[in-house]
Amino acid sequence: MSAVYINSASCISVQDTLNENILQNLKPENSVKLVKAIEPNYKEFIPPAMIRRMSKTVKMSSVASHYALKEAGIEQPDAIIVGTGMGCSQDSEKFLKNVIDNHEEFLTPTFFIQSTHNTVAGQIALGLQCHAYNFTYVNTSSSLEFSFLDAQLQINDGEAENVLVGSTDEQTDRTMELYCLNNTIKKESDFPVDYLHSTTHGVIWGEGASFFVIGKDKTENSYAKLTDIKISNRVELQETTVFIQDFLTKNHLSAQDIDAVILGFSGDADSDLYYKKAMDLFPDSALLYYKHLSGEFNTASGFSTFMACHILKEQQIPEIMMINSERKEEVKNVLLYNHLAGSDHSLVLLERA
């Protein structure tokens, strides 16, 4: 497949990623169970009457997609593709609560209609009056990567020239309670979290929305070239290096050609072993991590892709993300490796545009 270009990048996250000087203003968090996204003033973007009916993930995505399209100078994308792990879970919880409270009778359909995972892509299309290809991927931690892959196929097949691709996930009260009960989220006794040398289980949970315009052609403002993507539902721990090595070989690269590797260290002792294995492959590369800045969630890789875009464009690596002290004079190739609790492994190769 031919490479495509990331021509704009926008992110609403735990960090203040909508403002300028993003790489200089990153603040880590290691002592709370949940980290909340910094939300913009939605009234500047969405009519007040509509805001009341929108869940948090729809609002975050509407604004992030607005910024991405504006930066790329595009009014109508040729396709809208969104990846999400949990979808509009706020409205799902409200609907299920109504079912129980009303003994399955006299239910209003609003929460049910808005609880489907493809609500986000649909609402963005409605706002833009866009009747083009509209698709949602729900593949836990590789939802964004599947969306990128689809966008690449759409462009390579001549079906589209500019595709709006996004990822989004929100926190909801009941789901977070359940995550605490089954130890997906760390216990308070395990704080503060040492992300790189953790001996405890569970993670700090985050949320956010990241949107990108993927284009056929390079522009003056292009962030990166999206060279290739690899996704695997299951990878055995001892196969980690082979999984990565095969991907590099396919792209005619060696480990020495990778200037920076962004790894998804989450503070969960078991699942982080994959990243430690991966580190052994890259003794001469800058090794970075990011979930101490974003929290762990299904589409946290959207945040890492956003950061990788800025690192490639600005040719700066924030100290707060560095695992080792290796630095290359030029950051040309960046490899992103992510998974969630040991499942749905993804590799994304970005090149300086």
Image: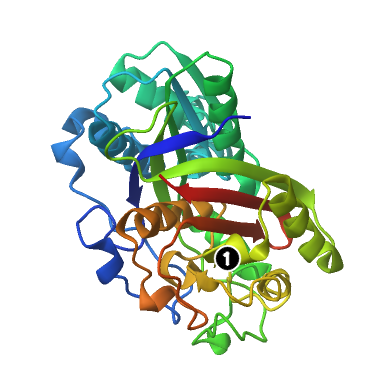
Q: How is the image coloured?
A: rainbow
Residue on which the image places disc 1: 264
How many residues crowd mark 1 within 10 Å: few (<14), some (14–19), many (20+)?
A: many
- At 64% from the left and 72% from the top, the residue drawn is 282
Q: Nearer the viewer, residue 33 or 20?
A: 20
Left or right: 14 as drawn, with respect to 88: left
Q: Nearer the viewer, residue 297 or 3?
A: 3
**Residue 99 coordinates in the image, percent (x, y):** 56, 35
- Residue flagged by tag 1: what amino acid is it? Gly
Residue projecting furthest to the top = 131
| Residue 58 against residue 209 in the figure, above or below | above
Left or right: 211 as drawn, with respect to 334: left
**Residue 57 coordinates in the image, percent (x, y):** 40, 43
| Residue 341 against residue 229 in the figure, above or below | below
Q: Is residue 28 visible?
A: no
**Residue 264 coordinates in the image, percent (x, y):** 58, 65
Q: Quadrant of residue 80?
A: top left
Left or right: 17 as drawn, with respect to 288: left
Q: Is residue 286 visible?
A: yes
- At 34% from the left and 66% from the top, the residue drawn is 316
Q: Number of marks in the image?
A: 1
At mark 1, the secondary structure is loop
